[in-house]
Image (cartoon, rainbow, N blue to C red):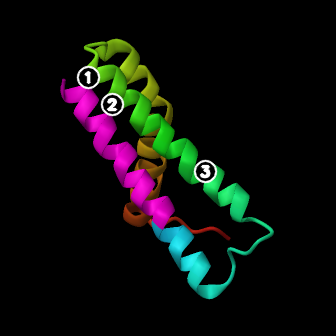
Amino acid sequence: MLIFRTFLVVDVAALFLALYFFLVGVADGSVSSFNILLWLSVLGGISAIIAVGYGLKTKDRRGPANAVLAVLALPAIAAALFVITLLIAQPRWN
């Protein structure tokens, strides 16, 4: 149960982050008719992962629900740990 909730929170956070970047891109014009389908497919894919994972959990299939949510949650956790490591270590890139 804890794993499901953790993965769900991470996935929703990733959706909000992607939605934030989408809205900022719409506001400044970098999201245009040329690439809006790419953006909508990414947002739809993230939403589908969350919806399928939650749907499986409501049918009491926690193992498959965790597996579906892990598809997005594990790379998001790894990316967050990488950014935190960069902020703490402050490496020299030269």
Residue 66 percent location from the top left of the image: 36, 23
Marks 2 and 3: in contact by CB < 8 Å?
no
Does 58 sit above or below residue 84?
Answer: above
Identify the residue at horizontal 61%, vertical 50% (top origin).
42
Q: Which residues are magenta?
A: 1-19
Residue 11 found in image quarter? top left
- The local secondary structure at tag 2 comes to helix
Bin the neighbour count of mark 3 within 10 Å (Cα to Cα): few under 14, some 14-19, many 20 and up: some
| Measured Cα–Cα span from mark 1 to mark 3 | 24 Å
Q: Secondary structure at mark 1?
A: helix
- Location of residue 24 in the rendering, given as x and y in whole percent from the top left corner: 53, 78
Image: 16 above or below 6: below
Q: Quadrant of residue 56?
A: top left
Query: What amino acid is at disc 1?
Result: Thr
Residue of label 1:
58
Comparing marks 1 and 3, which lies closer to the viewer? 1
Q: Which residue is mark 2?
A: 54
